[in-house]
Image: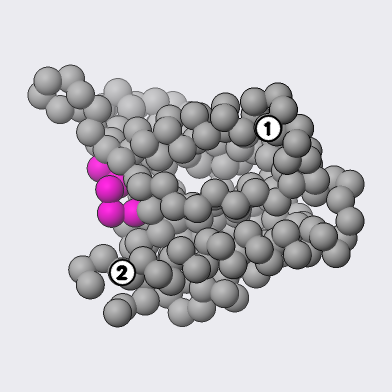
Amino acid sequence: MAVPRTLVVTAHPDPDSLTHRAAAELVARLGPGTATAHLAQEGFDPAFGLADHLTYRGLEPAPAEVRAEQRRIDAADHVVLVFPVHWWSFPALLKGWVDRVLITGWAFDAAADGRVVGCLQDRTLHLLPIAGATAGAWAGRGYDRAFATQVEVGIAGFCGMPMGVTAFVHDSDGGDPDLLAAAVQDAAAAIASAIHGSGARGT
């Protein structure tokens, strides 16, 4: 069975952050066929500007940096987003990446009858969020359900992407360092196991 190709995307300005350590752990477990997109370190601009608006209106092609990100996704069987949770969702950098890259005509389109048709059915999405709050706080206030609705249904589902593993690392702000390290390993292992067991497109 061919090795699945995976794109690991991070969105954190500090290369020594828990987010980057989690991404490194995942990449090490995935092995060959893994590409990384460290958005902050690469200088990706998350601002949805005039050029993006004109693309959305169908008046101009997508900007070059957007097409480059789309090519990275095109080359992957799996996409893993590794990110710190900001206000119960994506940080601005990652949200801007989604806004600019997962666009109509490429990530989704409209059928003749008006239905939205996802175009990324061949790429599975996995999530490794690093959350400052505890798992109990997430569940107790309904943030877990809201997050799933927004990201797993509203983004992945809209684009036709099958959902893989969502593996949270909770209590990152005040948790015990040893427990956090173990949680990172568990999250990376869960995602890597799912990817290794999936096979690659065309196999």
What residue is rendered at 30% in x and 79% in y? 1
Helix, strand or loop under label 2: loop
Tell me the CA gap for discs 1 and 2. Answer: 34 Å
Q: Where does label 1 land, which residue?
A: 139
State the image coordinates of residue 146 (x, y, percent, origin top left): 57, 27
Q: Which residues are magenta?
A: 119-123
Helix, strand or loop under label 1: helix
What residue is rendered at 46% in x and 63% in y? 194
What residue is rendered at 65% in x and 69% in y? 25
State the image coordinates of residue 8 (x, y, percent, origin top left): 52, 60
Q: Is residue 113 above or below residue 16?
A: above
Q: Is residue 40 above or below residue 86?
A: below
Looking at the rendered structure, which numbered label has been put on residue 200? 2
Quarter location, residue 101: top left
Q: Majority secondary structure of the magenta segment?
A: loop
**Is residue 147 magenta-colored?**
no
Quarter location, residue 85: top right
State the image coordinates of residue 30 (x, y, percent, origin top left): 51, 73
